[in-house]
Amino acid sequence: MSENAKLHYQGKEFELPLIHGTEDEVAIDIRSLRNDSGLIAFDPGLGNTGSCKSKITFIDGEKGVLRYRGIPLEAIESHPNFVEVAWLLIFGSLPTRAEYQRFSRSLTDTANIDEDMKHHFTGFPRSAPPMAELSAMLSTLSCFHPEFLEVEDPCEVEQVAARLISKVRTLAAYAYRRSRGLPYNYPDPSLPYVANFLHMMFSKPYQQYILDDEVMSALNMLLILHADHEQNCSTSTVRMVGSSGANLFASCAAGVSALWGPLHGGANVAVIEMLEAIHKGNMTAEQYVALAKDKDNPVRLMGFGHRVYKNFDPRATMLREVSEKLIKKMGTNDPLLSIARRLEEIALNDSYFIDRQLYPNVDFYSGIILRAIGIPTNMFTVIFAIGRLPGWIAHWYEQKQETGGRIWRPRQVYTGNTRSSYSSRASRGWEEV
């Protein structure tokens, strides 16, 4: 006997099937609600709406759990490898040795962008926002790779995924170098993924960037922790655009635009700005927290709380350890890290934050790590996009494989004028010419 929820409306009863997820999540299937009852669901922000079924990422916000394809992120922490995780997300399982070697080789072989693409960078002012350049250049890639505008089989998906994941770091590095009037660095085929990105960012003519294992490990872990996070704003954007049949380049470019928003990908920038304001203002962490608790004061404690997590963000826990190891290894005494640790200590022992379930989130420490590596604030969200790209590809591909998929088309509750008459121009004060 099937299990159903029941809705009573205007003397009628409507049965709505239940859908059970593999982690005991239960959803009410309302696909027939409007046809059967004339009603629609009203859910601004879609916080209570399941927009799809997915096998990619599981989050339990109450318990602070995050798993990629069933694997807890803590299991990846001891040997972080972004390329391995990218394959896991897109294709559903950890790669075999042969698959990993093939994919890595493809990332290396496709790292260069067409020489003509460089001319597009010169069309942007040097002060252009890097996220604007990245979104535009991802769309531009489709012009240089028309053979991947339509992909069907896994082999084609692997090829286009490798090109996007490889070239996105090249595009990001080129945008950074041009904004500073520096010559472009070509990808080095002898370097692995993260090391190659750092080389393209920071190597100087006749002076190769010195790669540090702790830096590479930290950046690997940061990219991994940003690789996917279920149906967030940018991922849902990729799925929505993809539902129209749009190609992967266009869908991911739309994802970059969604991530650009300060409420999404720009949150770690706000954390650094907060920490700098405290430091430059010679304020104590206690004084800043007092201001944040004052409801009449606009000051807010950035990097705390999350839409999904009502417990500790597991990504924040891991990045805190990464940041401490990195700062210690680099031998720098970053005052912002000390301020961050004190803010966390105060908040975790203050009933004001505990009662409101405001715990540190992933943005609280990611900015400190990027700052320590030498990445400027305006590139923070670009790094986020590099990390999130495998997740976007995975969701686009998962949706494409579905049978009977429909274009996304939400409903609305109209609150405007009822039927109105058209008033003549004369009655609106127009003078006859």
Image (spheres, rainbow, N blue to C red):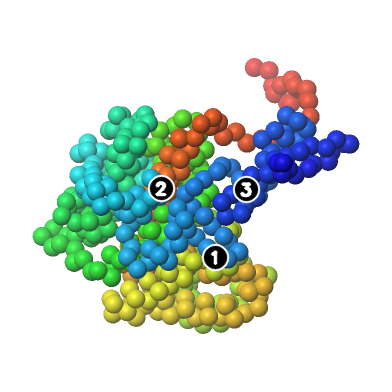
| Amino acid found under the numbered disc labelled 3 | His
In the rendered image, the residue lying farthest to the top is 433
Q: Secondary structure at mark 3?
A: strand
Q: In this view of the protein, which residue sits in the foreground, 261 or 255? A: 255
Q: Position of residue 337 (x, y in %)?
A: 42, 76
Q: Determine whether 317 is above or below 8 in the image.
A: below
Q: CA distance from mark 2 to mark 3?
A: 21 Å
At x 59%, y 58%, the residue is 307
Q: Position of residue 392 (x, y in %)?
A: 43, 45
Q: Position of residue 296 (x, y in %)?
A: 68, 70
Q: Earlier in the sequence, mark 1 or mark 3?
A: 3
Residue pointed to by mark 2? 92
Q: Secondary structure at mark 1?
A: loop
In the rendered image, the residue lying farthest to the left is 206
In the rendered image, the residue lying farthest to the front is 1
Label at residue 64? 1
Q: Quadrant of residue 225?
A: bottom left
Q: Is residue 170 visible?
A: no
Label at residue 79? none
| Amino acid found under the numbered disc labelled 2 | Gly
Q: In this view of the protein, which residue sits in the foreground, 255 or 295? A: 255
Q: Determine whether 152 is above or below 385 in the image.
A: above
Left or right: 194 in relation to 281 = left
